Every structure is written in structure tokens, then in C-alpha cells.
Amino acid sequence: MVDLEERPVARRPRRVAHPPHRVDARVRRARRRTTRTAWVLRLVAIGYVLGLVALPVVSVVQHTFADGLAPVWDVLTSDDFLAALRLTAVVAGIATVLNTVFGVGMGVLLVRYRFWGRRFVSAVIDLPVSISPIVVGVALILVYGTYGWFGGALEDAGVRVIFSVPGMVLATVLVSLPLVLREVVPTLEEAGVEQEQAAQSLGASAWQRFWRVTLPTIRWALAYGVALSLARSLGEFGAVRVVSGSVAGESQTLTLYVNDSYQELGADAQRQAFAAAFVLMAIAVALIVVIAALRPKEERS
């Protein structure tokens, strides 16, 4: 027989339960520390925004209306301002349309198809926003200038690119190139291809699938990207400055109008600069409101 010897069973040490009031006190102290930290971070964020955004905006508004509404109205109805406004609308409108077509087409190509060099193409598209706009303008001059690769041949054919509207459009297109694309691509990737494959199995053509399936899927992302592209196009300065020549009434956009007026001496020139800056700021605020209104719709879809 095997003598079974009883061995003492090891017992786990019992946890000492803390009184409920001690636990509640710890929780309250942790909450107070978290609340204080949150308030400090909020104050830092508010101060940062006030210093970088709110104070300059208030300063522009103050200088714009310092002498009343009549001088501002005189600036807004002047020939040079209206010419700059029309040119800005033309350049930004054309650039936004081109970027929209390019962004949707390239987005479908990058998401729906697999080909050699796909990642390289995607990286190259982001290049214009990764470098200085001045470099973009200089590169355009080297390619389309009088002594550039194609500039001489184009001028012989009667097409002038640099120091004219086509060059300004090209510069604006390049600096805002990936904005629509980068909004469309995530939506296409999230939507998948099931709906398009189902439409194809029912006999829908490529255009029918695009208009009835793809476009409704990306509509809010597309609208958001268009608003971003338009805002970037309206505010472009560096690249346009290099390729435009900034001739008043001919090749001067609103941003160039602000810069040239501010550099001139005299109260009238300063008033012109602040009035034009106020118009650009008002347009930017309106676009921000549109973007903020579109973003929740995109997220819900």
C-alpha cells in the first residue's frame, strides 16, 4: 500500500479589500489631475490658435475698415482690383476643374487597377506639395520658358506659356494637384468593388458603372476635395509670382495684388492691400464653412 501523506495545501494570500471611501477618493484625485491637464492643454491650444489665426484676422479686419466703408468700396470697384479678381477666378476655376478630372480618373486607376510602377506614380503625384512653390515656378520656366525645353517651339507656334495665363494655370494646377485625389482614394478603397462587379454582371457599361455606382459613392469626398483644391488655388502666391510677371490688369491675381499694393508707399496702397486681403479671407472662411459642412456627410457615407 502507498501511504498517502497529507500535504498542506498552499493557499493564495487574500487580497485586502479597501474601504469604498478610499477607492472613491483615489478616483476623485485621478479625475482632478486629468481635468487639470485637460484644461491646461485646452488653454495652450486656444492661445496657439489665437496667436496664429485670430489676431492676424482681427488685425486685417481692423485695418480694412479703419477709415469706414467708403474707401473699401472704392478699392473693390477699382479697375485693377476687378481685373485681379476676374483673373483669380479664371485661374482657380480652370485649375480646380483640371484637378477634379485628374483626381477622379487617377484615383480610379490607382485603386481599381494593379500595374507596374503604381506606387511610384502615387508618390510622384505628391511631389508638387512636398517642395516649395517657388521651385515649381522655376521648373515651369525651365520647361516652358523662352529658352526651355518646349518654350521656344510653343512661342514659334504662337502659344506663350510663361508670363501669361497658361503658365499661371499650370503653376496653380501643380501646387494643388493631389488634393482631390487624396480625398477620393480612401473612399474608393473603403467602398470596394462589389457594387461595380454586380453592375457589370447586369450588363452595365463602364460609363454607366461610373455615373451610377462610382460617382454617387465618392460624391462627398469629391466635394470636399474640390473645396480644398479651390481654396488652395485661390491663395497660391509663390509659383504664380514666378511665372506671371505680375502686371497690373493683365497677369496679376489677388494674392499678387495684395503683395504689390502692400509694398508700395502711401495710405491708398495700404488700403488696397488690406481690402483685397479681406476679400481673400472672406472667401477662405466661406470655403472653410463649406468644408466643415461636407465632412460629416462624407464620414456618415
Image: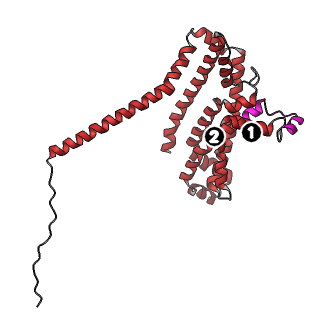
- Assign the N terminus to one quadrant of the image: bottom left
In magenta stretch: residue 165: yes
Image spot of residue 216 (x, y percent): 58, 45
Camera-side residue: 83 or 138? 138
For label 2, the residue is 129
- Label 1 Cα crowd, 10 Å radius (few <14 / some 14-19 / many 20+): some
- Disc 1 marks a residue whose amino acid type is Ala
Looking at the image, is 296 positioned above or below residue 121?
Answer: above
Mark 2 or 1 closer to N-term? Answer: 2
Disc 2 or disc 1, which is closer to the eye?
1
- C-alpha gap between disc 2 and disc 1: 14 Å
Q: How many marks?
A: 2
Question: Residue 184 appears at what percent x and percent y?
Answer: 59, 46
Q: Is residue 68 above or below residue 41?
A: above
Please, what is the three-letter code of the amino acid marked with disc 2? Answer: Val
Which residue lies at the image location 67% right of the left edge and 18% below the top edge?
263
Q: Which residue is mark 1?
A: 139
Q: Residues within 10 Å of mark 2 (few under 14, many from 20)?
A: some
Viewer-side residue, 95 vs 269: 269
